[in-house]
Amino acid sequence: MIHFSLSRFLKKKAKHLQTQETQQSLTRHHLRNSIIYAFIGLSVTACGIKKTRVDNASTPHVPTQLVNPALPGDNPDPSIIRVDNIYYATSTTNEWAPYFTIYKSTDLKNWKLVNHVFPEGFKDMKNQWGENNFWASELVYDSKQKRIYAYYTAHNRATKGNPGLQCGVAWIDADKIETGKFTDNGPVIIEDECGAIDAFELQHDGKIYAFWKNDGNGCGKESWIWKQEINESRTQLLGQKSKVFTNNQPWETGLVEGACFFSLGEYIYSLYSVGGCCDARCNYKTGIARTKDLSSGVWEKYANNPIMVSTNKWNCPGHGTVVKTADDRLFMLYHAFNKSYDVFVGREGVIEELIVGADGWPLLHNATVPNRPKSDLDFTDNFEKDSKLNLAWQWPSKATRPEMTFANGLSLAASDENHALGTFLGQYIKTVNFNIEAQVNPGDAKAGICLGGAIFKSKWPGELGGTGITASKEGLVVFDNFEGTYTELKSSKESLTGPAQLKMQISNDGKQIEFFYKKAGSDWVSLHRTEFLAAKYVPWGMGYRAGIVVKGNPSQKGLFSSFSIRNN
């Protein structure tokens, strides 16, 4: 039970209400409830993990003015935990490797990518069991073991159809999460009929419970959130599974999924999502439910659900988790599409505070605005100073890590993979108006820059297509293979005997691309400009990737000196 001084809390809460950046957007209902909150005696555990209260004088205070998106770019289904005074977050990586990001923050405002659950992709998984659909990683801290566990979804390569969607668990000692490697337990939660996704853990009354969704909407059945006890090593479910709740109210369209659980006072609460999550037709919403007794199977849903819906700034918010700070505040990290970017960037990680009302329900104000400076979103990689690949880079999830070396630049092995696109390394875009630039040293392979998406009418969202510009000893080529066939849009026999700079300027909210090149000592030359059907090639559930590409035979290499993305 957590106890604190009422007078000190009232002073702190009053100051918080005066300074909170979004307070003017709160309704009178939420304002009244947040004041009454000061008189409610709380016993809080963040996502089911009980913690000893830490003296606020020795811990950093969470900044009142949060910055959103907290996790810019394609970071769906985010999860967050606190270990002492450090926060760690993870997110879905879908059809891209490495699998499952690990971010670090000390203030919920500034985040740094420090690791991945599976840095080498499927090679790091037990028996290399996962094939694709790398979804919904959830972090949990076991303070007794001092371990961090990562629940995650993947499709088992040995199982066809929806039953192949299974939930695995990996673990790492907490003090090694930033530099170490997770150990994979393999698939633990398996649904024979429709598959299992969106696993979540709650530690409660000395027991450990796993929750998940049976993916009924994927096989013509009902979708339910399920619960079952799990052992301490997170290798085996115990006893019998039981139903938690489903989408049974008029506003709860389509399906239920992405359920998070946390304890507050005498209740266990669940934030959950309903509807379509992942493309321009999405109608995602977030609701909340609670129970006093996990074993009863009786859940009360909030009368004023949904508590979070689309606004004029964010579209289809949901599927997140809750964390409690050292100064007893609750925050939810969830995903949403930035309406200024359509769905081209993907679902970004958004954070906001929950305020407990007079009736004890923790509520979201649903008025968060994008306020992260675009300068924060720029990326530069000087390959000539690198000794290993920056963690921001990704490759298609079914492929092995591309061969590369670092010696006065990045030497990347060529291929004719990805529908003849070549070897591709990319990273998620963060706006829809930006420049991609790289300096290459022309050789036998065609090396350059590329905007990657999905092949039109592709078999799966990770079937990579792209458009870009390359340079080689034979000259310059502007190419496109989004329709499944590699096509040269424009070529030039320009003599390139020294380093060349290449640029793609994406403008008109992602709907126009102009391709440039520049030789040493000269100005930029426009080689080609085209309208781009951004809505046609955006992958389901993901945003576009910007990166580098090398086309040729495997013995050939592309040599890159630098790469950058500048957001306009």
Image (cartoon, rainbow, N blue to C red):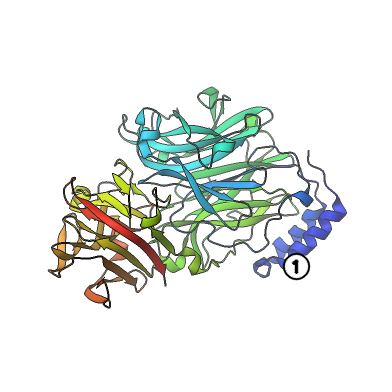
Q: Is residue 86 left or right of residue 504?
A: right
Choose between 368 and 194: the one closer to the eye: 368
Quarter holding the N terminus is: top right
Which residue is painted at 48% across and 57% down in the image?
Answer: 348
Choose between 471 and 317: the one closer to the eye: 471
Give the labeled residue for mark 1.
18
Q: Residue furthest right?
A: 7
Q: Is residue 468 visible?
A: yes
Query: Callout 1: helix, strand or loop?
Result: helix
For label 1, the crowd category at 10 Å Cα-Cα, with few meaning under 14, some 14 to 19 and many 20 or more, is few
Q: Position of residue 201 (x, y in %)?
A: 57, 35
Q: Position of residue 309 (x, y in %)?
A: 54, 59
Image quadrant where residue 516 sits: bottom left
Q: Is residue 455 visible?
A: no
Which residue is painted at 51% across and 62% down in the image?
Answer: 310
Q: Is residue 567 left or right of residue 265?
A: left
Choose between 281 and 78: the one closer to the eye: 78
Residue 223 vs 383, above or below: the answer is: above
**Kind of residue indicated by mark 1:** Gln
Image quadrant where residue 429 sits: bottom left
Q: Residue furthest bottom?
A: 523
Image quadrant where residue 478 sits: bottom left
Q: Position of residue 234 (x, y in %)?
A: 53, 27
Q: Position of residue 490 (x, y in %)?
A: 15, 69
Which residue is painted at 32% across and 71% down in the image?
Answer: 505
Residue 266 vs 35, above or below: the answer is: above
* Image label count: 1
Quarter holding the C terminus is: bottom left
Q: Is residue 556 left or right of residue 65?
A: left
